[in-house]
Image (cartoon, rainbow, N blue to C red):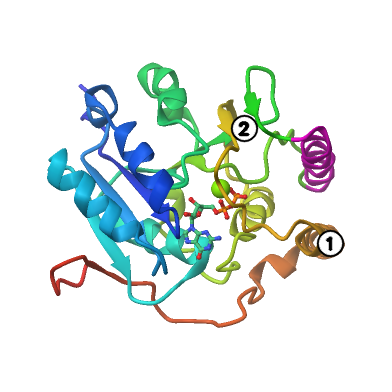
Amino acid sequence: MKKQDRMMLFIPAYNCEKQIVRVLAQLDEQVCEYFEEILVVNNRSTDNTEGAVLKYLAENPNDKIILVRNDENYGLGGSQKMAFGYAVDHGYDYVCMLHGDDQGNIHDFLPMLKKGIYQRHDCVLGARFMRGSKLEGYSLFRTFGNVVYDFIFAFVTRQRIFDLGSGLNLYSTKMLKNKFYQKFPDNLMFNYVMILASHYYQHDIIFYPVSWREDDQVSNVKMASQAVKVLNMAFAYLANKEVILDEYRDTPREAYTCKVVGEDKELL
Ligand SMILES: Nc1nc2c(ncn2[C@@H]2O[C@H](COP(=O)(O)OP(=O)(O)O)[C@@H](O)[C@H]2O)c(=O)[nH]1
Ligand SMILES: [Mg+2]
């Protein structure tokens, strides 16, 4: 008999005091059944994100949820590196990410988890631009821009791409163990380089349609400047695959660590 898969969820959170409680409210019994542990990763928010989580937990105790704070602001990519390292070190088989700003819904992944689809791939990437996806509050221009970029990355990586980086993904820790991602950008471009890396390292990725909404969230993606950078990255990789081994970070660091909020306990 196959042993039970050990799975954890992490929720990167940065300045989303209003949205994070709605994300926590998504974590009902049905969801918690799949995850042994749920790490809410406060990436040094400057608003009351942490207070909002603590208040929610005081009112709705859930002993699977642990609130941690990164030792520095690591960006979204850095927060993922921290959580990936944590998942590997703690013996998890899979690590799932759900953004803390309540644009996605973890319930979209439940049928996929139930069917065990993740067991046959290195990662399952939530896709906003695929048959079955649902978008709310996204302009036609933005959707079109994303689809064009998906095509460009598909051309570069010779596989179908339906999203360059949504906020709901699941990774097998087998693929993460060697830390191939360590020098990837610490910012929001982390996931774009992960797509290029899937080609370089021949990861088996699949896309799974999810819903995504934008209502009261503030996107930090600076669209125009990022769009150019991302394009450059894709074409640099097309020209020379070995660029994937380069240093992509502005501030290279040795380690990505965090502590449990309210305790001095080092978690990594
Ligand atoms: N922008 C940003 N987001 C972070 C950071 N650390 C964690 N996050 C979380 O990462 C998620 C994605 O960021 P967001 O700006 O909403 O990007 P987008 O939704 O992809 O347009 C949000 O849930 C943030 O709370 C960080 O340093 N910067
Ligand atoms: Mg967002």
Q: Residue 51 at x, y = what percent? A: 26, 58
Q: Nearer the viewer, residue 34 or 196?
A: 34
Q: Residue 226 at x, y = what percent? A: 75, 61
Q: Residue 254 bears which disc, if any?
A: none
Whether residue 104 sits left or right of residue 2 in the image: it is right
Residue of label 1: 228
Q: Is residue 89 at least partly visible in the picture?
A: no
Residue at point 44%, 26% (across, down): 109
Residue type at mark 1? Val
* Residue 140 is a magenta residue: yes
Whether residue 225 sits left or right of residue 59 in the image: it is right
Q: Residue 82 at x, y = what percent? A: 38, 64
Q: Is residue 27 above or below residue 230?
A: above
Whether residue 148 sits left or right of residue 42 in the image: it is right
Distance from Cα at disc 2 to Cα at disc 1: 22 Å
Q: Quadrant of the N terminus?
A: top left
Q: How many marks?
A: 2
Bounds of the magenta span?
139-156
**Residue 234: quadrant of the picture:** bottom right
Residue of label 2: 127
Q: Nearer the viewer, residue 19 or 184?
A: 19
Q: Is residue 148 at least partly visible in the picture?
A: yes
Q: Is disc 1 placed on a helix, strand or loop?
A: helix
First in sequence: mark 2 or mark 1? 2
